[in-house]
Amino acid sequence: MEVLRPGRVGPGLADRLHRRRPHGRTLTNGFGPAANIDSFWTNWNPKYANKDHGNSNGVYGGPPPRFDDFVTRDLIAFVEDHFPTAGRGREWRALQGTSLGGYGAYELGLKHPDVWSTIGSISGAHNFLFAPSIDPQPGIRKTPLSTALPVPLPYLDPPGPAPTLVRVDRLPDQLRGFGAALVVYGDPAVDQAYYRGNMPRDLAMNARAYHERVQSLHIRGFANDAIPRRAADVTDPPRYAFEQAFEAIVLPMNIDMELAFTSERVQRTYELHPGLHSDTYWNPFLRAQLEAQYARVRHWDGAGSPPPAPTTFDYRSISTSFSVWGWDFTVDRPAVEFLTLRNVSCRSLSLQGTGSVTVTVPAACDSGFDPDGAGPKPATSTFAVDLGNAHPIDEPLGVGATPIYGTTRTITLSPLPRAGR
């Protein structure tokens, strides 16, 4: 959702908007194992791509689709460059989706909380691992234990059999969505870290960004109770079975998502409504959803209440290179695991994980790290933090959410040297 200037959305532009809307699936002759496969709105696991280019784990030829990049980089830039948006930047943007789109809205929103003012999910699927997880509780918990290795060991990346055994392109349409997850994320046994790095359930703490106790990301969602209320529901048995089954699947995921938000003390609005997985039951509540989200973005006339950018935030990611809230992080480690950041501000930050992390502090902070503690070298805004030797395997079973995984270091920042200071 981008705010458009009034009087500029005529029939021609409306048609262009319709034709340019995100497809959300692989295209004919595009990347991926087959055409019209659900994208899951994420960058696919590269481990199972490039089969024709020497990748022994490859399931399909060509590079992995990158739908996360498409939305957050290409689509936003296209809309702002080609349509009469009222402004640019996060305060003008909202993100909302239904079903798999609801998963995408929370997944993209929690991965990139600095891109949107508000995110919304309607009957979204928030945890494809179908299993409880461990929440990284707010705050740093000091512990003498650590799983950082005393000596470096070679990295092991065992292949998972599931993506190879399941041919997504040969599955019936009704099962393709489930089968596609095996090439999007990988094998749920050996690639759990990649799954968790893309599950809203495991990214709940990324909404912990605050400016004077005001949360910087507005969150609102709802699901249905999977109970039919209309006699017409049962007149089409196949459709009824689909709509009832899918809402029954996503409802526990929404409950689990709410438990994660509660554990992380994240502010949000969640409602449970009657009905099945269908527009018939969603539509009566869409207006309230859209109005609530629209109220949290900047309007063309200056109205609206977008939440402020944070002065402190928490964040976790399996990416080895990412930017969030103006900070840049690059991690040197081979294993797929979380780097967890807590209490990040212009004054200090805490990091938990393994490997070497290069941090660049935003220029607006005017602060950096002095490794010598007022020594001969001045503080610098780009510096490296050593978190110990990397693990030889990808993070298993969500243990990166526990305080004993890897090494935790707290870095105190100092003012940058300046003439006259």
Image (tube, helix red, strand yellow):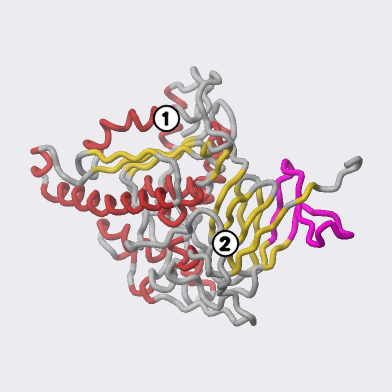
| Position of 316 relative to 286 (above/below) | below
319 or 418, nearer to the observer: 418
- Would you say the residues marked 2 and 1 are in contact, meaning their CB atoms lie under 8 Å apart? no
Residue 378 occupies quadrant: bottom right
Residue appearing at x 20%, y 53% in the figure: 245
* Residue 405 on image: x %, y %: 53, 69
- Is residue 27 in view from this perspective? no
Q: Name the mark nearer the viewer: 2 or 1.
A: 2
Residue appearing at x 55%, y 20% in the figure: 302
For the record, the magenta segment spans: 358-383
Residue appearing at x 81%, y 59% in the figure: 373
Gap between marks 2 and 1 measured at Cα: 43 Å
Mark 2 residue type: Leu
Upstream in sequence: badge 2 or badge 1: 1
Residue appearing at x 40%, y 70% in the figure: 187
| Position of 343 relative to 96 (above/below) | below
Q: What residue is pinned by disc 2?
A: 339
54 or 71, nearer to the observer: 71
- Give the side of residue 147 with respect to residue 397, left or right: right
Local SS, label 1: helix
Q: What residue is pinned by disc 1?
A: 15
Residues packed near mark 1 inside 10 Å, few (<14), some (14 to 19) or many (20 plus): few
| Position of 167 relative to 209 (above/below) | below
Whether the magenta-drawn stretch holds residue 199 is answered as no
